[in-house]
Amino acid sequence: IAVWVATYYVIVATLADFPERPKLDFIHNAVTYGNLMLIATAFSAFSIGWRLTPYKNTEFIFKVLTVIIGLIGLVLTHTRGVWLAIPFIIIISGLIFYQKIGWKKIIVSLGIVSVVLVGTFTSSSVLPERIATGIHEIKECTSTNSLAFSSMCNRIQLWHAALLIFKKNPILGSGSTANFPKALPSFAEQKIVSPQVAKEFGEPHSEIMQQLSAFGLMGFISLLLIYFAPSYIFLRRIRSQKGDLSSKIGAAIGLTVCTGFFIFGLTELMFRTMHMVSFYAVMVGWALALSDPES
């Protein structure tokens, strides 16, 4: 249901803003919106192997359609970073089903999935163009114009500023996320960030950099534990001989949430708002219960 509703909103925004990128700020920014869409689409894909109703064929068709609809919605968001997590989701899928259908079928299935994903990605003229633009922006920022105002260069400037704050107090950082935007005008004077970046951005555009600058190594370690402590449990449950397929799918759902938030958090502030923190906590807790082989 989440996938269908999310894609509906993307289509409405696309039609309203065409040919520009759809504006989804009324819910999240487009990046976070696309990230959450991928997570929900992955849940639907995993559940194809987990029968939930007496209507086996109808359920299968609906789930497959949901995955297709989710991929269409992802393409329409024009989000680049979301595609970085897809290879990891494919690997998680292989871990779930290899004991049931064998590695040979898994490899063939993953090959088919990869072809479908590549076809989906290249079906949009915008996404490949945005990838090429991102590469050009990185090259420009790291060579000829370090203060260029562009999507990728803005991030590089903000990450540089965050690392400089971190170096002043590597153990505890600046002590608060509120100190980062206060430091940007000084960095603009030193030509570390552009005046426009200092004016328009109040966070480092990275969960990792946010923790390093605000809370130092203590915050960084805490964040890694939030990602990887439950990931370790989920991975063990996927590989365990205990539990049925439904518990392994529950573990895959949890591992997807943890892995997805980690990957997305490299270039985006996923824990920007309390409702995103709550979503992560509730989904991880639910997946821990769902994947418990003893329950």
Image (cartoon, rainbow, N blue to C red):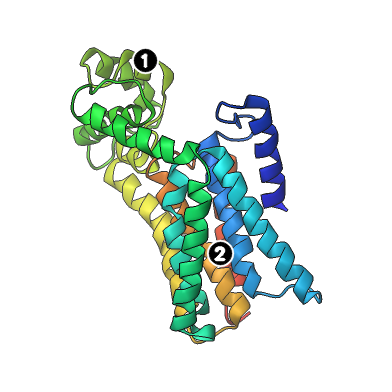
Q: Quadrant of residue 41?
A: bottom right
Quick one: label 1 or label 2, which is nearer the N terminus? Answer: 1
Residue 88 percent across, percent down from the top left: 43, 61
Q: 109 or 164, which is in the foreground?
A: 109
Q: Amino acid at mark 1?
A: Gln
- For residue 45, say whether it is visible: yes
Q: Is residue 146 left or right of residue 270?
A: left
Gap between marks 1 and 2 measured at Cα: 40 Å
- For residue 286, say whether it is visible: no
Query: Is disc 1 placed on a helix, strand or loop?
Result: helix
Q: Amino acid at mark 2?
A: Ile
Q: Residue at x 20, y 16 (%)?
A: 190
Which quadrant would the C terminus be assigned to in this image?
A: bottom right
Residue 187 percent across, percent down from the top left: 26, 19
Query: Is disc 2 placed on a helix, strand or loop?
Result: helix
Q: Residue at x 66, y 63 (%)?
A: 64
Circle 2 sits on which residue? 253
Q: Residues within 10 Å of mark 2 (few under 14, many from 20)?
A: many
Residue 208 percent across, percent down from the top left: 35, 43
Q: Which disc number belongs to residue 196? A: 1
- Residue farthest to the right, as pictured: 54
Residue 139 percent across, percent down from the top left: 24, 32
